[in-house]
Amino acid sequence: MTTLQRIARDRHALAIQAAIGWCIGGLGPVLVLGARDLDVPRYQLAWLGSAFGFGLLGAGVLGRRILSHGAAPVTRVGAVIVTAGVLLLGFGNTVPLLIGGGLLQGIGCAAFLIATPALIGVKDRARRLAIAVGVSSIAGLIAPAAVALADQMFTTGRVGLIVPSFWLVIVALRRVRAAEGLGISRPATAAAPGRRMALDTWRRWSVIVLAVSAEFCFWTWGAARLVDSGVEVDAASGLAASFAIGMAVGRLIGPRSMGRLGPVSLGALVCGTATLVVITDVSTGFLVVAMTVAGLGMAVLYPVSLARLLDDPSLPEPRLIALAAFASGVAITVTPTLLGVLDRVVEIRYAFVLVPAFLAGAVALDRRSDRSD
């Protein structure tokens, strides 16, 4: 199968993942630009990233029921909701409007996240998910640069987030098909002992929580870290793309080595080491390089941990998809707020010590899960 054929096969999943990446990649720049535009302290917008997570929590609770309607309507509704959220984030002139935009964006992206496995199917899942989220990372890479450029051209760079609304309308109007051979109705297999299987599911779920938590430290507060190092706000919005560059490269080359390397342990080691540089008082150049390397290491943690959870034989797949969305929601809800609290009492660079802690926990749980397979 050629590259073009692979893209055509997964085109709908790639489109909605691109939208997710754009929205997530723009969160950090919107946080610092929103604080500047509204002349409020950054911590007042700490809930911006958490509001995004609340949508995922809702999808986690209702995901099984939502998926019963099929991937196509879920994708279309998600497109409409994300567009509304993006418009609020781009034009909102109060803190509640921005947080409301983040909430709507989170709800819509949550719909996209639970629809993605249904659009991809079960064949070669881990690699295809890695490629899909690789496209998401490329969009996340472009978003901060687009926001920074828009800030030079318009009253505020937040309007740069509006770009995805155009392709979201197209996604909403086009016919969307779920993948053939999807295990969406796969029954849970009998497992003995049941308690051990439940613990395995819990470990795999927790790895997603920790991996996404570590990732969102950079997405939400990477631009703020650059500002605190002396970079101007508009320039920080563009330089924050360094983390997305590493993510995009890692997710596009990562699938080739998934069968030969331990991606969770290796990725955590690379990202954790780079984060130690982010924590130290280094020049802007070293900081940008460290954030790029951190993104490279972080790249495959989410798609690999997601695929491992979805391959759990103890539960039906719709429930596993809902659990995965809930895991991301827990991470995205708690982590940005936690860093926002820390930003009030210590320099934001010290708050990044959470990243190695999250990664160490993910590695420990992943290894326990491997031994129990």
Image (cartoon, rainbow, N blue to C red):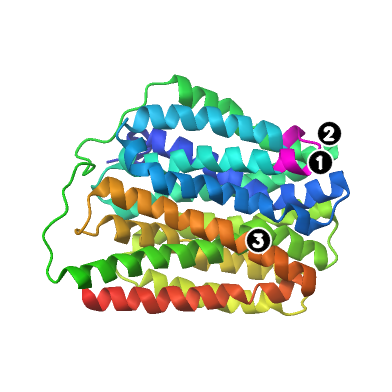
Give the Cα separation between the discs numbered 1 and 3: 26 Å
Give the Cα separation between the discs numbered 1 and 2: 6 Å
Q: Are marks 1 and 3 in contact (CB under 8 Å)?
A: no
Determine if the magenta segment contains residue 337: no
Quadrant showing the C terminus: bottom left
Height in image: 44 above or below 301?
A: above
In this rendering, position of residue 196 left or right of residue 324? left
In this rendering, position of residue 185 left or right of residue 111? left
Indicate the amino acid at tag 1.
Answer: Asp
Numbered disc in front, either 1 or 3: 3
**Residue shown at the point (81%, 68%) measured from the top left:** 229
Quadrant showing the N terminus: top left
Q: Work out whether residue 201 or residue 295 is closer to the camera in this orientation and state it.
A: 201
SS at mark 2 in the image: loop
The residues colored magenta run 90-98
Q: Do the residues labelled 1 and 2 touch (CB within 8 Å)?
A: yes
Mark 2 nearby-residue class (10 Å; few <14, some 14–19, many ≥20): few
**Residue shown at the point (52%, 60%) measured from the top left:** 331
Indicate the amino acid at tag 2.
Answer: Phe
Q: Name the residue under label 3.
A: 337
Give the Cα separation between the discs numbered 2 and 3: 29 Å
Q: What number of labels is visible?
A: 3
Numbered mark located on residue 151 in the image: 1
N-term-proximal mark, 1 vs 3? 1
Viewer can see residue 245: no
Numbered mark located on residue 154 in the image: 2
